[in-house]
Image: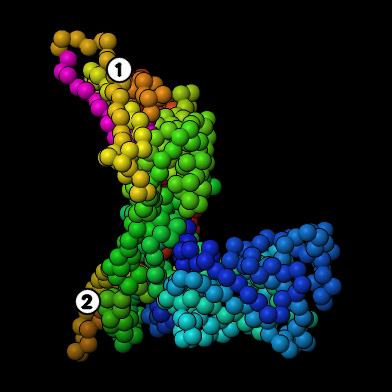
């Protein structure tokens, strides 16, 4: 009996990275700047009244980082003589449905009265007292366009305690089960050749059972899980409210986000492909590189980051996917198959066969600085000298129709790798069979080499290139595998 | 224990019950189906515990009419909160109903004696989920 959930990170995107934290009344050794990212210390031994439980879990403070502990203890009435104040300033303005305070989550110790003020410049937008009743508490207050948050810790839940905070999150994480989600689907594509970098998408309808006004914001992360298996992490692209608690939400993956981010271009000589990818991503997403690095020479013209990543991947000869991970996974497709058995394949599998490719040509580029050159990168002009590499299909018969594949715009394909790239493109197009089957998803990822039963008693082996996932507690996917 | 409390109003006090069924239904999602081996793949959304209650007119004509009027008036609500028997205690859940029928047993001295009102209360949400 499996269970699927969507975790919507209803946070102000970028606020944690932009936050500048200052605090009054902090104990020496507190590092308030850690509050936006948070810390996770174990239960720390203190001599506060009734705080140290002798259960063997408590540890000396030692080198554990504490984000915020107040310098003074609360009194008999749990109030502070001078309440600690934490101020968070932002360079940009943000909107959120509230903030989540993580007090001392390891012990459960928490504050019992907190005041939060939201400002836009000097203008006070909201001033609310909250009475937290747990170590993780969401201060619900929708505020738009704020650039300063002031948190005053007024009262502890027990007398003679310090106020302790592990983290301040500018929003809240919400979990939706399948009783609240309708029509949820994910379409995830991957190109084994990396001649393109498809954007994976997902859409779902939230039929909210909570009395909450949602504020779906662009780029907010949405994780989809089936039991303990992560299906994907996508980012809100747009949303539409169709009734009181009904929201249609559509998302795309990291490549969709990168498609909306400009890249100025660059000129490279013997540049590490992995380093170049990380440079393009610029810390926006984490790279999970499982492929051997290589050196690339050529240019990337100005465009989007997605386009730049595609150029690197194609020249490198690897592929990338965001399916089944919160990172961008770069890898060489596996050739050791795992079996997807008849016990999780639905009837109706089919195989499409593509037309034979008679010839492949790949154009390699050599760029030399030249004031009359036609390629301009960062204000400098370069002359592009093209060299064409060809692989001809030796098995073409007189009956075959001419079908030539040409790759001309791969600007990181230099003459040193031109022929090998042409061979790789040819090898890819030699895999003409696309097998389509509907399976019960059990952690399969794009790029995996799988053996799937066909409808006439045999099996087909190939790499997963597309999954149309229908989300429910049992996850089913219409898969495409490209085989030989 | 209440056998039929609707939105906090206990109707089993004023109206008699002649038939009382408790049932559960397991709902599968669209991804359920049989795979190539013939084995069934379940896609369990949850289990819904509901009640079908038949009321009868045990002489209290006004109370029976009030129940009918109440059910008709609230039939346009998305749901009602039902408290009904479950084992040796009772459970409360959001329920909806979509129809009701009562039979005219007799008319006497200008009074209509309606009888046998059967309502099928269906839970809005699964009480048991994976």
Magenta stretch bounds? A400-413
Which secondary structure dominates the residues rendered in magenta? loop
Residue drawn 30% across and 79% down? B74
Question: Residue A410: within the magenta?
Answer: yes
Q: Which residue is mark 1?
A: A391
Query: Does A136 sit above or below residue A188?
Result: below
Residue drawn 35% across and 30% down? A366
Q: How is the image coloured?
A: rainbow
**Closer mark to the observer between disc 2 and disc 1:** 1
Decide if residue A401 is in sight here.
Answer: yes
SS at circle 2: strand
* Viewer-nearest residue: A411 or A155: A411
Q: Which residue is mark 2?
A: B104
Labels 2 and 1 in the same subunit: no
The answer to whether A475 appears left or right of A353 in the picture is right
Query: Does A3 sit above or below residue A316?
Result: below
**Residue A223 image position (x, y, % from top left):** 46, 54
What number is the disc on residue A306? none
């Amino acid at each position: 009996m499996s269970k699927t959930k969507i975790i919507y990170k209803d946070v102000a995107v970028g606020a944690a990275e932009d936050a500048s934290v200052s605090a009054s009344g902090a104990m020496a050794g507190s590092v308030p700047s850690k509050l936006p990212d948070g810390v996770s210390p174990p239960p720390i031994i203190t001599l506060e009244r009734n705080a140290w439980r002798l259960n063997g879990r408590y540890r000396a403070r030692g080198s554990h980082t504490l984000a915020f502990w107040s310098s003074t203890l609360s009194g008999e009435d749990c109030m502070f003589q001078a309440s600690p104040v934490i101020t968070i300033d932002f360079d940009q303005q943000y909107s959120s449905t509230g903030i989540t305070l993580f007090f001392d989550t390891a012990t459960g110790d928490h504050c019992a009265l907190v005041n939060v003020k939201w400002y836009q410049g000097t203008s006070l937008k909201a001033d609310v007292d909250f009475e937290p009743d747990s170590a993780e508490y969401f201060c619900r207050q929708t505020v738009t366009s704020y650039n300063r948050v002031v948190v005053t810790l007024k009262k502890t839940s027990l007398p003679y305690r310090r106020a302790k905070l592990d983290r301040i999150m500018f929003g809240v994480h919400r979990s939706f089960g399948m009783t609240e989600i309708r029509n949820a689907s994910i379409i995830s594509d991957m190109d084994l050749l990396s001649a393109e970098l498809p954007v994976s998408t997902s859409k779902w309808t939230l039929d909210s059972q909570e009395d909450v006004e949602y504020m779906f914001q662009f780029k907010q992360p949405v994780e989809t899980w089936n039991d303990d298996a992560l299906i994907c992490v996508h980012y809100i692209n747009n949303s539409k409210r169709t009734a009181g608690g009904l929201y249609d939400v559509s998302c795309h993956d990291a490549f969709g986000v990168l498609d909306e981010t400009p890249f100025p271009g660059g000129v490279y000589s013997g540049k590490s492909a992995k380093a170049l990818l990380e440079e393009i991503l610029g810390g926006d997403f984490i790279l999970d590189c499982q492929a051997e690095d290589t050196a690339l020479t050529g240019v990337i013209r100005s465009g989007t980051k997605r386009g730049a990543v595609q150029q690197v991947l194609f020249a490198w000869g690897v592929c990338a996917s965001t399916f089944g991970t919160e990172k961008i996974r770069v890898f060489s497709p596996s050739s050791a198959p795992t079996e997807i058995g008849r016990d999780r394949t639905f009837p109706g599998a089919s195989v499409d066969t593509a037309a034979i490719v008679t010839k492949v040509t790949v154009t390699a580029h050599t760029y030399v600085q030249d004031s009359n050159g036609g390629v301009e990168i960062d204000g400098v002009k370069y002359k592009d000298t093209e060299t064409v590499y060809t692989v001809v299909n030796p098995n073409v018969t007189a009956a075959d129709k001419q079908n030539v594949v040409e790759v001309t715009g791969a600007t990181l394909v230099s003459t040193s790798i031109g022929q090998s790239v042409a061979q790789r493109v040819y090898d890819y197009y030699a895999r003409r069979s696309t097998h389509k089957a509907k399976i019960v998803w059990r952690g399969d990822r794009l790029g995996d080499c799988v053996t799937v039963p066909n409808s006439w008693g045999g099996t087909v082996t190939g790499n997963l290139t597309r999954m149309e996932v229908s989300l429910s507690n049992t996850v089913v996917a219409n898969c495409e595998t490209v085989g030989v | 224990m209440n056998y039929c409390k609707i939105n906090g109003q206990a109707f089993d006090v004023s109206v008699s019950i002649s038939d009382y069924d408790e049932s559960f239904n397991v709902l599968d999602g669209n991804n359920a189906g049989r795979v190539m081996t013939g084995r069934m793949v379940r896609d369990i959304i949850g289990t819904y515990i509901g009640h079908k209650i038949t009321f009868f007119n045990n002489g209290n004509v006004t109370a029976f009419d009030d129940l009918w009027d109440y059910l008709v008036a609230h039939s346009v609500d998305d749901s009602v909160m039902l408290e009904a028997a479950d084992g040796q205690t009772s459970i409360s859940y959001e329920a909806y109903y979509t129809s009701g029928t009562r039979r005219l047993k007799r008319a006497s001295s200008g009074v209509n004696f309606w009888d046998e009102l059967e309502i099928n209360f269906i839970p809005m949400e699964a009480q048991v989920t994976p």
